[in-house]
Image (cartoon, coloured by chain):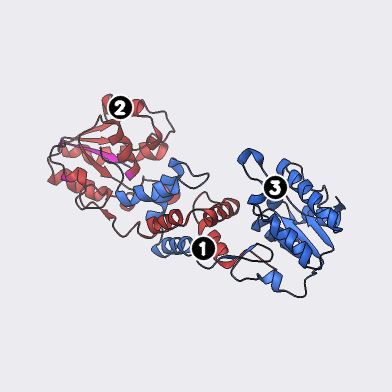
Chain colours: A blue, B red
């Protein structure tokens, strides 16, 4: 049986392994790329191929960065007394976009999720506890998503951090429950930052 | 303002240029690739980068292939008296999958679509007329999609080809109107092939 030419099939096979890409959209993308300008195609290939080469984890806040420490951790003008704890690097981008926060960050790289087998040891929690001991932290603002797992992770962290005497806060309930922090608009996120409450 | 690290932003920018990929899904894909195994990421980059390097148009049927002529045109056991005209390379794959057709193909690479500015000269129609003159063709089966543009293109081709005395047929109306040939199931496509009628 005749199938599609091998280089095309190879790309379709690589594309269907991506989340949210089925066989039909993989085919569409492959044939789109076949007709796209060569420089656009090569730029995409290079962006994928070189993605990880220059990316490191910041040893302080655990965010993905091109330098260690990252640009935020290196910035002495930022408020060193508050750490905002988020699930993912994109959450840092979302909060920075509000312009309403000037402290530091800590990226967990996930949430506690027993159903998917993600426990506290799979997240960057030990590094957070370490920072709380070494750094002049007065407040830890837990900005995990307002989902079941995000709330459970916030509770877990609060129980670990409070005994050390640090103020533990949570983003205000301006966020729609069940929503995703990364998709929130600037105004909603700004209000949630202003109205943060002790946990 | 702090944004996402440059190599990640570069990939997001390259991904949003793809059809059907918005900023949110581009971000999701980029962060998925950051955590994916390095060999999977490099395989995807290579599949994209090398996509066009080995792909040529078959000078006979105009299909995309790794050889010229393509494997179907090279196959002497195939019925040389019938040419099935399709819009896209994926349509060849769909028809081959039925196992009900053993003739040759001709790929137009599109349909006549005045709204999008696609005229007959933008398609591989001249090459089809040339084949009809040079090759021992008895029947030309027009398998464009059962859409407005596909039907119009079929009518246009029929008017060009019939004066030369060749039998011009069309896939039977087993295909759901408004549908896409490439998505049809094997049974429907097989029936449409069997029930083809003179145009």
Is label 2 on the same chain as label 3? no
Indicate whether residue B105 is drawn in magenta.
no
- Find the residue positioned furthest to the bottom: A76
Please tell me in which quadrant of the rendered image residue B152 appears. Answer: top left
In the rendered structure, the answer to whether residue B110 lies left or right of residue A135 reads left
Q: Residue at x 73, y 53 (%)?
A: A185
> For the residue labelled by badge 2, is the local secondary structure a helix, a strand or a loop?
helix
Residue A124's spot in the image, x, y percent?
67, 56
> Which residue position is annotated with label 3?
A180
Q: Residue at x 49, y 51 (%)?
A: B19
Is disc 2 in contact with disc 3, using a CB cutoff of under 8 Å? no
Q: Mark 3, residues whose alpha carbon is within 10 Å: few (<14), some, or many (≥20)?
A: some
Is disc 2 in contact with disc 1, using a CB cutoff of under 8 Å? no
| Residue B169 seen in the figure | yes
Q: Mark 1, residues whose alpha carbon is within 10 Å: few (<14), some, or many (≥20)?
A: some
B159 w.r.t. A40: above or below: above
> Which residue position is annotated with label 1?
A52
> For the residue labelled by badge 1, is the local secondary structure a helix, a strand or a loop?
loop
> For the residue labelled by badge 3, is the local secondary structure a helix, a strand or a loop?
loop
Quadrant including the N terminus of chain B: bottom right
> Which residue position is annotated with label 2?
B190
In the rendered structure, the answer to whether residue A71 lies left or right of residue B195 reads right
Q: Gap in Å between the C-alphas at discs 3 and 1?
A: 26 Å
A92 w.r.t. B154: above or below: below
Question: Chain ID for label 2?
Answer: B
**Magenta span:** B74-89
Q: Gap in Å between the C-alphas at discs 2 and 3?
A: 47 Å
Which mark lies nearer to you, 2 or 3?
3
Q: Gap in Å between the C-alphas at discs 2 and 1?
A: 47 Å
In the rendered structure, the answer to whether residue A18 lies left or right of residue B137 reads right
Question: Chain ID for label 3?
Answer: A
């Amino acid at each position: 049986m005749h199938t599609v030419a091998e280089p095309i099939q190879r790309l379709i096979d690589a594309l269907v392994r991506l989340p949210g890409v089925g066989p039909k959209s993989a085919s569409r993308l492959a044939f789109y790329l076949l007709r796209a300008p060569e420089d656009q195609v090569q730029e995409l290939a290079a962006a994928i191929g070189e993605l990880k080469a220059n990316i490191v984890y910041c040893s302080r806040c655990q965010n993905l960065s091109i330098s260690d420490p990252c640009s935020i951790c290196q910035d002495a003008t930022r408020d060193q007394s508050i750490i905002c704890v988020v699930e993912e690097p994109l959450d840092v981008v979302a909060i920075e976009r509000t312009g309403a926060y000037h402290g530091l960050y800590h990226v967990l790289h996930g949430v506690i999720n027993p159903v998917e087998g993600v426990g506290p040891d799979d997240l960057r929690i030990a590094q957070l506890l370490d920072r709380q001991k070494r750094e002049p932290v007065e407040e830890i603002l837990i900005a995990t998503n307002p989902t079941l797992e995000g709330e459970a992770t916030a509770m877990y962290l609060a129980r670990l951090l409070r005994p050390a005497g640090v103020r533990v806060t949570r983003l205000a309930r301006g966020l729609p429950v069940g929503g995703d922090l990364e998709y929130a608009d600037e105004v909603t996120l700004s209000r949630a930052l202003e109205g943060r409450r002790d946990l």
